[in-house]
Amino acid sequence: MEVIYGLIPGMLVLGLVAVGVLFWAARSGQFEDLDGDGQRILMDDDVEERDPRRFPDTDD
Amino acid sequence: MTAYQDSARLAQGEPAPEPCYHCGLPAEAGISADVGGGLRHFCCQGCRAVCEAIHAAGLQGFYRRAPEGQVLGPPPEPPKDLKLYDLDEVQQEVVTGSADEREVNLLVEGIHCAACVWLIEQGLGGVDGVREARVNLTGRRLRVKWDSTRVRLSALLQRLADLGYAAVPFDPQAAEGSIQRENRRLLYRMAFAGFAAMNLMWISIALYAGADEGEFRGLFHWIGLLIATPTLAYAGWPFYAGAWRGLRQLRLGMDLPIAIGASMTYLYSLYVTLTGSGHVYWDTVVNFLFVILVGRYLEAMSKRRAVSATQRLLDLQPRVATLLREGEEAIVPIRAVRAGDVMLVRPGETIAADGAVIRGRSHVDEAMLTGESTPVSRTVGDRVSAGTLNGTGSLEVRVAAVLRDSALGRIVELVESAQASKAPIQCTADRIVPWFVAVTLALAAVTFGLWVRQDAETALMAATSVLIITCPCAFGLATPMAIAVASGTGARHGILVKNGAVLETLSAIGHFVFDKTGTLTEGRPRVIAVNDAEGDWPVGTPAGWSDARRRLLACAAALEVHSEHPAARAVVDLAAAADIRYKALTVDDFTAAPGYGVSGRVDGSPVIIGTADWLARNGVALTAGLADAGAGADSADGTVFCAIDGAAALQLTLRDRPRADAADTIRALRAEGIRVTLLTGDRRRVAEAIAADVGADQVIAEVLPADKDAAIARLQATGERVAMVGDGINDAPALVRADVGIAVGSGTDVSIASADIVLITSELGRVRDAGRLARRTLRIIRQNIGLSITYNVIMVPLAMAALITPLVAAISMPLSSLAVIGNSARIRRLVGADGPGNARRGT
């Protein structure tokens, strides 16, 4: 059980790293737009409309 | 006019029109265009233009991305004078960066969904010179980086306007920098407390599971100390600061029991760790701080949402004035305007500073300052006031006072003094807290006293358990959680609650005071009586009018349709309602004399419409009958004469009309036992006529703008809780003075800043919805407080009997908090069930 003397400080360091990452994320504006970024990745660029031949099966 | 047309269409039983291709509102007949491979119908020209622009830019993918069936609403009116934003003087306040890479933050009206994000980012990204465009959907704003040597800012704003979005630059630091920094600090504290709570949790589990007896007991205790100490110092700091502030002001605040509970628990655990006997409560210290910080953060978030939404409304106001310097026009920020400058005010512009007219003639709408609905004529030598709206003519104004010293500035001062004299609102929780704290401290002392004769350690443990158990976890969440849910629900229904505590006050309001012009009434007059040589017309039943009378009104309307004056619109509305085809008539020689009237030839016959003076100046004498009819009308009602073929033919009496939902709203309020008063600067007879129309109990008329807050104070002096509903700048002091100030959305910036609650739309029904939301919120708050008190009533005797084990405490505390959170979430459902209707229009 001596391993616990190493594991507990390790856990605290890992935890503090996680807190540090969160602070950094908040400071760099990661939580500014919770609605938009989630949906932005679903909005593809409009390649198919400029060149329909590349995607013959699209419904447009 | 559209209301009449709508009712006319409904009466004829036409089928419901198909939705507008762009925004989803019912399409108007005759507005259509061939875009995107088919004939599309639209609700307005704005939507048609936007749709064509979107297709022309090759961005029609927007329509595929927009959520099915969502009504977007027509595009907002684009801001005027975009060219202003190219000036360095204007840009320096809001733009950062060098010439080839500038960055600006824009507030954007008209963003609804992720498809809008796509459209804006694609639409701007395709413009040459734009480096980056990134939309913040939550904040409805846009950050653009662009090369100002290749494209101008005004061109970007114009591009946005073409795509259906109104954007204005703003300075994010000035707008909400301090609130945001404060919230971020709170988030850090919450995150740190969360980290500490998670780590301590499993150390505690180990201790409960038996480690408390084993070889690691000492290690776990010291690790608890190591984690809890920085947590108490950092995350617990706001509570100590708050408790200290409260103590200095001799108030037992919510922060005090939190600080005492956390400290006592901490000190007891420290004692156990050092002496090695008893149970530690490190997990309780940090869990408790974490849960309370979550409550605080939720509260701060809901407040920020409302503040930033109202800030948006303020930032959309003009910030520049046009000065004439040595004959040259110069556009300068309002701050740079000095007394003695000559300012050019174009038609439709807001006057930026007080002054005297030195050239030109126009009508000025001073409703926001005086409450007077009819624009007043202003010509050389007359004074004009900052914040008022210029009508159809251009004015040159010599500035007499800068904003700070202007009439508007004085009203802002009144607002500030009223704010200073208003007692802070106390919530039920705030009122209970001092008692709660006192009782808790007394019980802990009693417990210690009872047990100390047996042995000191049990006594200390039992007393601390009492403090831990009563640590108002659930109590601390009871109000903020309910208010957070309520303001979120309100915001989705177009009710912005700027100050959560007023929800409680609002539910106890016994007296509603409504401003008349612009709030209860539409702020635009309509014709209520028509006289001709043969006497009074039956205005309500146009079907019964003779052909000769219809012909007279057609001539009048044909001429008036060319005028922008509210009285002219009223005449046109009357003709449209009577289904009179005035558009077929040809009009020549149209001339308008501001302050008097209009003249012209309709199908060849000379027609003159305006005041009695105007007719006299055109050589037409009034017949005795018409002059009497005009004199008989209430002097505050507008009266207009019309002469055809050189002879006076018509006299029309005009009156501002109550909003369609005014009577319903007031009836519903009175049915709930609430008194309703009409407060106005207008004359008593007009006010009483409107009050009778809408069913108000009481009228306070002929009140000077500066005395409105005094009128509210007099009502409050009779012991009533008073809510004020208003929109104008002149209502602002009264909004602050009232127990609850509600600004109607079309209102002016100062009134919005002064109100506790802002209604985004002008629908009066929202006033009732706000009241209903408030009552529900209060009910939930009471239930929450009841829940946490019940919890305490059960647990405190156990703690006093020294029967609480750490395990029981660890399980029961989060349970009570979860119960409160779950109960608060019901506000959303309650309002959703039978609450405010047509939710979508409010969002």
Image (tube, coloured by chain):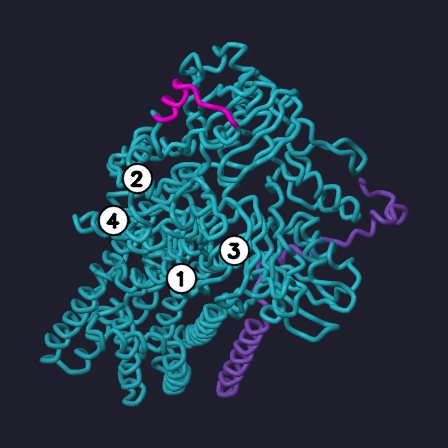
Chain colours: A purple, B cyan
Which comes before the other along the chain, label 3 or label 4? 3
Q: Is B130 covered by the magenta stretch? A: no
Residue B286: % across, % down? 38, 74
Q: Which residue is mark 2?
A: B678
Tell me the residue at 41%/25% (across/down).
B528
**Do residues under tags 4 and 2 come within 8 Å of each other at their CB atoms?**
no
Q: Which residues are magenta?
A: B619-631
Between label 1 and label 2, give the one nearer the viewer.
Answer: 1
Which comes before the other along the chain, label 1 or label 3? 3
Q: Is residue B747 visible?
A: yes
User: What distance separates the C-alpha of mark 1 from that of mark 3?
Assistant: 23 Å
User: What distance separates the C-alpha of mark 4 from that of mark 1?
Assistant: 21 Å
Q: Which mark is residue B358?
A: 3
Report which quarter residue B247 is drawn in: bottom left
**Do residues under tags 4 and 1 come within 8 Å of each other at their CB atoms?**
no
Q: Is residue B812 visible?
A: no
Q: Are marks 2 and 3 on the same chain?
A: yes
Between label 2 and label 3, give the one nearer the viewer.
Answer: 3
**Which chain does the residue under circle 2 lie in?**
B
Which comes before the other along the chain, label 4 or label 1? 1
**Numbered disc 1: secondary structure:** helix
